[in-house]
Each structure stands twice: as C-alpha cells, then as structure tokens.
C-alpha cells in the first residue's frame, strides 16, 4: 500500500481546515431500505470525489462478500479522497478491510470497539483492562497493513470521561492517526459534547499526535449542532452523510455542517475543501439511488430551501435577496430562488413571475388576473407555472369581456335527465346585469351549452371538444378546447378550471364571445363594446 500523502495530524491540528469524512456508503447505507449495488456505490463515490470530500468510508468489508467487493471497487477507482474501510477490533475484520483496500491510493482502516459501561456489561462482557488491551492490539494490527488508522471508541458520549481519556491515550500511543469520538446513539447535547472534546484536548497528553474526529447521530435532532460545537472545541474532522441519512434518525448532514461554517464564517472561522456548488446534484443522486426522499423543508437541499410563498418574503427577496436569504442558491448548486405561487403570495411576486413567463399585463389586467389567482389558490394547494399560464391565457382569450360565467349548476346521471342552470354576467361595475336560464341536453356539456345559447341568443353547434390536464395531480387544472359552428362561422374557444364541467362552460362561452366580436364588424345589431344589442333571451336576475 502507498503512503498517505496528506498533512500530518500536527499540521491539521495547527490550522483551521476541517476534514470532511463522508460515510454515506457505509453508515448511510445502513438506513433501512437504502442498500446500494456495486454500480450505484461507484456512482455515489464518483460524486463524492467531485464534491472533494477528504475521506470516503466505502463500507464494512467483513459484512458480506458484496460489501467487500464494493469497497475494493471504490478503492481501485477513486483518486483523490482517502478510501476507508470499517472493521471491528477483530483480526478477521481487519484482514478483510486490508484486503479490500490493498489497491487504494490513499487507504485507511477504521477500527472500533465499544467503551461505554452499558456496552461493556451487556454486549462485550469485558472489563476496562480488556477493552484497552483489545483496542491497542487492533490498532497495531491495522498499522501492519496500513499507515493511516482511525480508532473509534463506540458510544464514546456515554463512556466515563476518565476511561475515555485512557483509551484514547493508549490507541494514539499504539499509532492511531485519528481518534473518532462517536455520539453513537445521538444522546449528547452540544454543551456536554463540547465539554467532552475539551476534556480530551486538555487531559490526554498525546492528543496532538492524532486528529480528533466526531461522528454524531441525530436521534434528538442535534447531530449537526453537536458536530459544530465539537469543532469549536478542537475537533478537526467531521463524519457525516449526504442528506443526513444513516442508522435510525440518521447522521449529521454534510451539507448542513459545511454550509453552516461557510455562512457563519465569523462564528466558525474554519474551512473545508468541499466544492459547494455540487452539493445539490450530489444530494439528488444519493436520494435517487437510495430511494430515500429528501423532505421538502430539509435545510440546504430541500425543495423549499430557497423557495418563498409569503407575499412579504417574496416582495423582500425581489427588492433585495438578502432580506430573507442567508445563502446564495448558486453556492449549493441551485439556479435561483423560487417564488412559490400560493395563497400567501403577493401581487408583486405574481406580476414578476408572469413577466418571467412572458406575460406583461397592464395594471388593470394584472389586478383582475391576481384576483382570479387568489380564487384558484383556494381550489388547489400547488400552483404550477402552467396554472399561471392557463389563468392568464383564460383572461386574454376572452375577446372583449361581453359575457362572463357567474354560476353553473349541473345535474347528471344514468337515471336522470342532464340539466344545467347557468347565470351569466353582462357588463361590469354598476351597469352590470346578470341573466339566468336552464336547459336539458343529452349530457351535462350539451345541457350547459344549450343554457348558454338560450341566454346569449347565439346558437352554436359543437364540432370538436378536447380535454387535457394542464398540471399534475388529482387537483390539477383542466384545459378544454372547443370548435363551434355559429351559422357557418367556425370559432375556437378555450377554458380552464379545476372543474372540467366549469372549464367546458368557460370554453364554450369564450367561443360565443369571439363569435359576437367577429360578427359585430359585419352587423350593427350584434353587440360589441359600447354598442347596445337586443335584450338576451334569459331571465334577468335582480
């Protein structure tokens, strides 16, 4: 095996560089249902290499022949990061790890042994002296295969501090270059964990001969906080996973640790080698590979991390991004902030998004569109760009607002006569009038078109009727396109709604309005804006 060409523990301890030890392929894969095959592990290893992590813990070689082969494949391919294999403090484990890592350019064997009283009593059934002896022998054996050896006293955060110091001193004396202090069950809290690292720094005489590493679990949601606190007290390596995956509630999330130090540089005056713009791409790869979905509100890489729905927040971000964003999206590989259109969105954000979609409306049309947008928000939870386009198109295709749909009620069934009751509004403001009528038909669409014909006095023959979904999901908007023959005049109409029947009524009414506008140029009796037409056939409502 080649010598590790990395800074010495003394050099690392003297600086503010934090090593990032990624265990996605080992601890992360231990998440229930997250098993990866060889090709998938190689894909993730390549992504971690591009991300520029310092150490890739590729697996637990003794666990299975497949795990051994995966560690071996990663070790042979990866050029840059240290490749690490995990082993219990047992000869067979250490030999398996050495075998898997034999072709690595920069290999590391990571041995561990539980040290807490509860593990000594119930799992290992060993005395303190036996634990120290076994740990030292394991480190020395690993060193016979590899010059870079890391030792972890499992369940360190629940180990008596005095005994932990004894074990750490002994393994460093035996040659361990890194000592990892795991919060194996996520029991520690930041103040307590920081104090433990401080105890090691002050009471272990040879502590500067090794790098202190920390490996925190998230059972209490404190993994990242504990890791960062440990760094403040002298740890120089953080063990973490992409998206925070891992045993039980997971591990400290790499992206959160790295971006906390980068964003709060004055409080955490440390640096990492991570190429942060590749964070989100790596997150997506791991999520897709493992099948473990990233929650929408996950820090840094969640879908909502750079999304704003509140009108106040959207307005602030549009005026100055830093009013509500402490990181630039591009720093983690996100193209730009996302203004999520929803019921909390403001008019400024709504207008801005329409401009981005290619629609620039005057103040009056924008106000009308915004009101319709608010109504749509009450009907469906997620508003997509296609919804906005449909909403504006629905407004723009209405040629001169002659008739507008005010109410629609349809009854239909296999043992009932399809009936539609329609109320249309004509005009606007104080001069607006509403007219209602009802009709039957062969089906709900035929009934509602007949009712609209009765009110408007326009008799159309429906030649083509098409329905399609504008967006996705059960609450998606539907788009209806119709072609109608009004006495030889072929007119197209389009309507949108989360209710397909309502969309059909809007589409047909849109065609009616288009026909009226077109005919108005030929006949003064047909209504056009500013012209008085004959009274409609429907019944006027008070």
Image: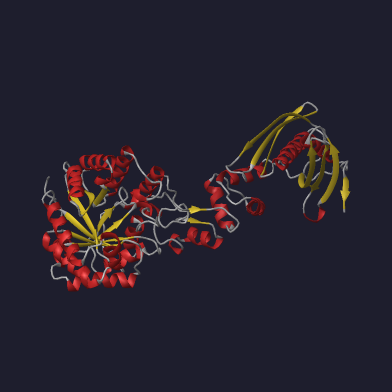
Q: Residue at x 35, y 63 (%)?
A: 186
Q: Nearer the viewer, residue 21 or 155?
A: 155
Instruction: Give the residue at the far top of this rendering.
Output: 488
Task: Tell me which corner region of the image, top left, top right, bottom left or bottom right, holds residue 527.
Answer: top right
Q: Nearer the viewer, residue 524 or 334?
A: 334
Drawn side of residue 463 relative to residue 281, left or right: right
Q: Residue at x 42, y 58 (%)?
A: 299
- Residue 73 on image: x %, y %: 24, 39
Drawn side of residue 64 relative to residue 451, left or right: left
- Residue 172 on image: x %, y %: 14, 62
Q: Nearer the viewer, residue 325 or 237?
A: 237
Task: Tell me which corner region of the image, top left, top right, bottom left or bottom right, holds residue 261.
Answer: bottom left
Q: In the picture, which quadrant includes the C terminus?
A: bottom right
Drawn side of residue 528 relative to residue 23, left or right: right
Q: Residue at x 11, y 49 (%)?
A: 3
- Residue 160 on image: x %, y %: 26, 71
Q: Residue at x 52, y 47 (%)?
A: 356
Drawn side of residue 137 relative to residue 441, left or right: left
- Residue 242 on image: x %, y %: 35, 52
Name the colouring of the figure: secondary structure
Q: Do we see residue 249 in this rendering?
A: yes
Q: Do we see residue 524 in this rendering?
A: no
- Total count of labels: 0
Q: In the picture, which quadrant includes the N terminus?
A: top left
């Amino acid at each position: 095996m080649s010598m590790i060409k990395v800074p010495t523990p003394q050099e690392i301890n003297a600086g503010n560089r934090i090593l990032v030890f990624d265990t996605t392929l080992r601890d992360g894969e231990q998440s229930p249902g997250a098993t990866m095959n060889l090709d998938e592990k190689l894909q993730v290893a390549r992504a971690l290499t591009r991300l520029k992590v310092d150490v890739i813990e590729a697996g637990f070689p003794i666990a299975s022949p497949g795990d051994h082969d995966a560690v071996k494949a990663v070790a042979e391919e990866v050029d840059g990061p240290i490749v690490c294999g995990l082993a219990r403090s047992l000869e067979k484990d250490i030999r398996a790890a050495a075998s898997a890592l034999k072709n690595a350019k920069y290999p590391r064997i990571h041995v561990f042994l539980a040290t807490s009283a509860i593990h000594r009593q119930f799992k290992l059934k060993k005395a303190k002296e036996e634990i120290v002896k076994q740990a030292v022998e394991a480190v020395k054996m690993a060193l016979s295969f590899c010059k870079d050896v890391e030792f972890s006293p499992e369940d360190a955060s629940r180990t008596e501090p005095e005994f932990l110091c004894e074990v750490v001193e002994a393994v460093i004396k035996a040659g361990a270059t890194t000592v990892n202090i795991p919060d194996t069950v996520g029991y520690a809290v930041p103040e307590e964990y920081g104090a433990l690292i401080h105890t090691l720094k002050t009471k272990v005489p040879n502590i500067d001969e090794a790098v202190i590493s920390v490996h925190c679990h998230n059972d209490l949601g404190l993994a990242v906080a504990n890791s960062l606190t440990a760094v403040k007290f002298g740890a120089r390596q953080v063990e973490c996973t992409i998206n925070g995956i891992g045993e039980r509630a997971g591990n400290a999330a790499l992206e959160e640790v790295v971006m906390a130090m980068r964003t709060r540089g004055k409080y955490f005056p440390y640096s990492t080698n991570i190429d942060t713009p590749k964070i989100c791409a790596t997150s997506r790869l791991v999520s897709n590979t493992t099948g473990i979905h990233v929650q929408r509100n996950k820090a840094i890489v969640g879908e909502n991390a750079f999304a704003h729905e509140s009108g106040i927040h959207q307005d602030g971000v549009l005026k100055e991004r830093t009013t509500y964003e402490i990181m630039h999206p591009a720093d983690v590989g996100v193209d730009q902030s996302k203004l999520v259109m929803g019921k909390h969105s403001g008019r400024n954000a709504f207008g801005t998004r329409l401009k981005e979609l290619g629609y620039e409306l005057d103040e009056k049309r924008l106000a009308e569109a915004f009101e319709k947008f608010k109504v749509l928000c009450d009907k469906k939870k997620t508003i997509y760009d296609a919804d906005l386009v449909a909403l504006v198109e629905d407004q723009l295709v209405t040629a001169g607002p002659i008739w507008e749909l005010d109410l629609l009620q349809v009854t239909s069934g296999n043992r009932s006569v399809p009936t539609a009751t329609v109320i249309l509004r004509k005009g606007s403001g104080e001069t607006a009038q509403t007219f209602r009528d009802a009709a039957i038909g062969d089906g709900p669409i035929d009934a509602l078109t007949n009712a609209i014909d009765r009110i408007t006095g326009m008799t159309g023959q429906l030649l083509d009727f098409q329905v399609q979904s504008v967006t996705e999901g059960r609450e998606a908007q539907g788009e209806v396109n119709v072609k109608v023959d009004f006495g030889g005049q072929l007119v197209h109409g389009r309507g949108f709604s989360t209710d397909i029947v309502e969309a059909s009524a809007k589409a047909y009414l849109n065609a009616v309005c288009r026909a009226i506008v077109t005919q108005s140029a030929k006949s003064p009796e047909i209504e056009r804006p500013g012209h008085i037409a004959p009274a409609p056939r429907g019944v006027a409502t008070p």
